[in-house]
């Protein structure tokens, strides 16, 4: 059993907020094109997926390496079973207009971060965007989650992405207050 599946099986999911978090909810509320093709990688229980579907977005997909969270989403949204991808994010071979980031990047070992950036570029359509939240606390070797900083993220992403926004999230949920950055990066 893989690490993530085991965490779900044991109920060791402290990252699970139990609902969509405020920064992503407010970002989604600003999106007007309901036809966007959206991916949520490492989506866990997929509250962002539910929110998008309930707000008229139909081209929303989730990828997760663990089956338990995908099964949880399928129980809530059985008509969207074909939108749930049980796979390693790094083996995906399709494209999207928008990728939403929430706790996936910070769960990857830091040495995989350059690979994440390359994969994001390959998964996004021209002018596609990755948006969401990144942790803002010192990078550690203990994790997940692993931290990071504005300077690290700029160094990592700015070669392939135009930085549209990278700022302290003013509306984080209480356990993450002052520890998150909201970002929008667009493929160059």
Image (cartoon, helix red, strand yellow):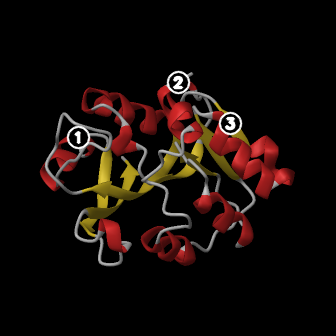
Tag 3's secondary structure? strand
Q: Where is residue 79 in the image (x, y as percent from the top left)?
A: 86, 53
Tag 1 or tag 3, which sits nearer the N-term? 3
Q: Mark 3 points at which residue?
A: 85
User: Is residue 134 rendered to the left or right of residue 101?
Assistant: left
Indicate which label's residue lies in the foreground, 2 or 1. 2
Mark 3 and mark 2 residues within 8 Å of each other at the beta carbon: no
Q: Position of residue 95 (x, y in %)?
A: 60, 39
Q: Mark 1 points at which residue?
A: 156
For residue 184, which quarter of the picture?
bottom left
Q: Image quadrant for the N terminus?
A: top right
For residue 107, which quarter of the picture?
top left
The label shown at residue 2 is: 2
Indicate which label's residue lies in the foreground, 3 or 2. 2
C-alpha span from label 3 to label 2: 16 Å
C-alpha span from label 2 to label 1: 28 Å
């Amino acid at each position: 059993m893989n690490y993530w599946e085991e965490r779900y099986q044991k109920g060791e999911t402290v990252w699970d907020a139990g609902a969509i978090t405020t920064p992503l909810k407010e970002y989604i509320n600003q999106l007007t094109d309901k036809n966007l093709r959206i991916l949520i990688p490492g989506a866990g229980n997929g509250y962002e997926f539910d929110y998008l579907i309930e707000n008229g977005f139909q081209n929303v997909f989730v990828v997760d390496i663990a089956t338990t969270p995908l099964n949880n989403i399928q129980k809530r949204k059985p008509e969207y079973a074909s939108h749930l991808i049980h796979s390693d994010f790094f083996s995906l071979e399709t494209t999207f207009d928008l990728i939403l980031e929430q706790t996936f990047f910070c769960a990857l070992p830091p040495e995989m971060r350059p690979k994440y950036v390359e994969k994001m570029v390959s998964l996004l359509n021209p002018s596609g965007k990755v948006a969401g939240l990144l942790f803002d606390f010192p990078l550690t070797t203990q994790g997940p989650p692993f931290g990071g900083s504005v300077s690290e993220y700029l160094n990592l992403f700015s070669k392939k992405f135009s930085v549209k926004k990278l700022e302290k999230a003013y509306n984080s949920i209480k356990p993450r207050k002052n520890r998150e950055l909201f970002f929008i990066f667009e493929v160059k």
